[in-house]
Image (tube, rainbow, N blue to C red):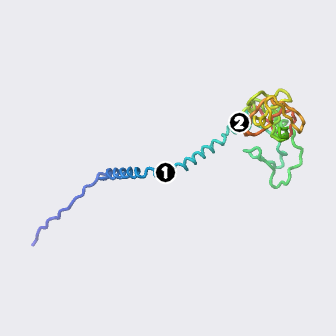
Amino acid sequence: MTSTVERPETRTSRRLPAGGPRPGTGIRWRVAARLARRQLRRTLLSSALIGVLVMLPIAAMTAYAVIGASMVGTAQERVTAELGQTEAWISVAGAPGSGFWQSPTDPTWFGYPENTSTAPEVTPIADPTALLPSGTEAIRVVETDVRVETPDGVTRIPAWGGEVWDERFHGRFELVDGTTPRTGREIMATPATLERLGVAIGGEVVLTDSDRTYTVVGTLDSAVLSDATSALFLPASAGLEGDARWYLPI
């Protein structure tokens, strides 16, 4: 004997559209936003304090980075401070050959091989411009220290010998006030020097080493000196001895 069994009824589930929002998603976001607003109103002061505490270190680091970057000159600024409007400078640093080396990025960094205990005994080159092509113009500048009289006694200050007030040194040395020397007894100084020596433009400065008196005719600013540094700028005829450089105008 056979009998017929009815098929059990099955329930079908409704599928959500692919990629569509789930039911109630917008409601949950609105509820979360409402709760966040209420919490913010209840803790407004502490929330503001937390925000400030987060921003302060960031602001400090940003300011430090900006100030630090602004204190480093660009390549062009460094070249101008070093050369002014000239194209190069040369100096005598050692004996040619004998393993003498020089840094390609820092002309003041040089020496001999480590296995060389002493520098070779050779006659140094007195005038390197003699090795340059005939007719090459060069401006000789000597950097040294001089002893001068002040209201409080005698002191030693930096000095340059040579026509550093030449317009081709613009950018390295610049006229601030007064005029440039026209005779061998006229000099220039930084503004800080006048205050330190107690003189003004037109006043006299006595160099105790040579016992010579010079008249200050103007003030000069140097890109390699701070505003508070005292320095004198004398003509080549003053015969200063020190580190000599020959600048090559363009």
From mark 2 to mark 1, how far is it between C-alphas? 48 Å
Disc 2, SS: helix
Q: Is residue 98 visible?
A: yes
Q: Quadrant of the N terminus?
A: bottom left
- Which quadrant of the structure image shows residue 104? top right
Are the residues flagged by discs 2 and 1 in contact, CB closer than 8 Å? Answer: no
According to the image, label 2 marks what residue?
80
- Residue 207 pos. (x, y %): 86, 36
Name which of mark 2 and mark 1 comes first in the sequence: 1
Could you tell me which quadrant the C terminus lies in? Answer: top right
Q: Amino acid at mark 1?
A: Leu
Which residue is label 1 attached to? 49
How many C-alpha atoms fall within 10 Å of the one at disc 2: few (<14), some, or many (≥20)? Answer: some
Specify the farthest residue to the bottom: 1
Q: Amino acid at mark 2?
A: Thr
What residue do we see at 72% from left, 34% from top? Answer: 171
The answer to whether residue 189 is left or right of residue 211 is left
Given residues 95 and 240, the one toward you in this image is: 240
Q: For marks 2 and 1, give the one nearer the viewer.
A: 1
